Image (cartoon, rainbow, N blue to C red):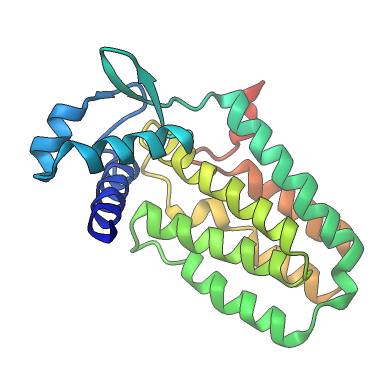
Amino acid sequence: MKVASNLKDFVYKSIESDILAGNLHSGDIINEKDLVEKYGVSKSPVRDALIALCADGILKSIPRYGYEIITYSVDGVYSMLQFRFVLESGFISRKIDTLTERQLDELEQLNEDCKNDERTPFEHWAANETFHLKLMSFWHNDYALQELRLTMNRLTRAYAQFYWNSNRDVLLSKDTEHHTDIIEGLRKKDAATVIEFLRLDLHNFGGFEDFFLQAR
């Protein structure tokens, strides 16, 4: 059973990695037979991985045809970014006075990773995700942290879709340029300033300098 589970996880992560790397694109169709041949495994772990990918909203099953890579709509991503803004800004406005200098120094260190333009797009996204999850963890609300983590996971795949369809000449660090302003506002305990820079930070997504304009 453990071997089968490991093979399923291997296939799952391999398909997900191909999506993030731009080897598979939204709307592409994959099928069980091709995956069995590609990964050199039996049908069972491939089928289990495909079922799990469907359950996680990455694939959509098309009977007697295959599995389609889910396409994220602009409005769908906009809704997730709106949710993030409400969640993150709400805790900032209520809890900003509880932050310590040590916690802010942690954010400074994490932000250095976000400034690194020598990384791959998804190493950069992971650094951005870590920054926001770390800030959320400081509020000591496990439910909110879990909800943000789930949303960021979905946005990872949306980021891949929109990144590969955007102007990739833009520096990766461009979409996290407001982290420095956020940290400065947190140090000053200025919630209004932090929330405004959070709004601007969320506007930069997937290679677009103002993603929210795409949803108009």
Percent position (x, y) of residue 140? 77, 71
Q: Is residue 134 above or below residue 212?
A: below
Q: Is residue 43 above or below residue 144?
A: above
Question: Image quadrant for the N terminus?
Answer: bottom left
Q: Is residue 82 above or below residue 76?
A: below
Residue 65, horizontal then vertical, whole percent: 26, 14
Taking the image as shown, residue 71 lies to the left or right of residue 9, namely right
Instruction: Identify which residue is drawn at 27% across, 35% down.
Output: 47
Residue 19 percent coordinates (x, y):
32, 39
Q: Which residue is the extreme one toward the bottom?
A: 102
Q: Does the rendering let one see residue 207?
A: no
What residue lies at 51% left-to-right and 73% top-to-bottom?
112
Please name whichever residue, 163 or 154, is drawn nearer the observer in this view of the structure.
154
Task: Judge by depth and name the residue closer to the eye, 83 or 191.
Answer: 83
Looking at the image, the residue that sits furthest to the front is 1
Is 91 situated above or below 31?
Answer: below
Image coords of residue 94 (percent x, y): 91, 62
Answer with left or right where residue 13 lies relative to residue 151.
left
Q: Is residue 126 left or right of residue 178?
A: left
- Report the residue that reaches farthest toward the top: 64
Please report the residue visible at 73 percent of the width from the left and 41 percent of the height from the top.
Answer: 83
Q: Residue at x 69, y 60 (%)?
A: 145
In this rendered view, identify the residue nearer to me: 131 or 56: 56
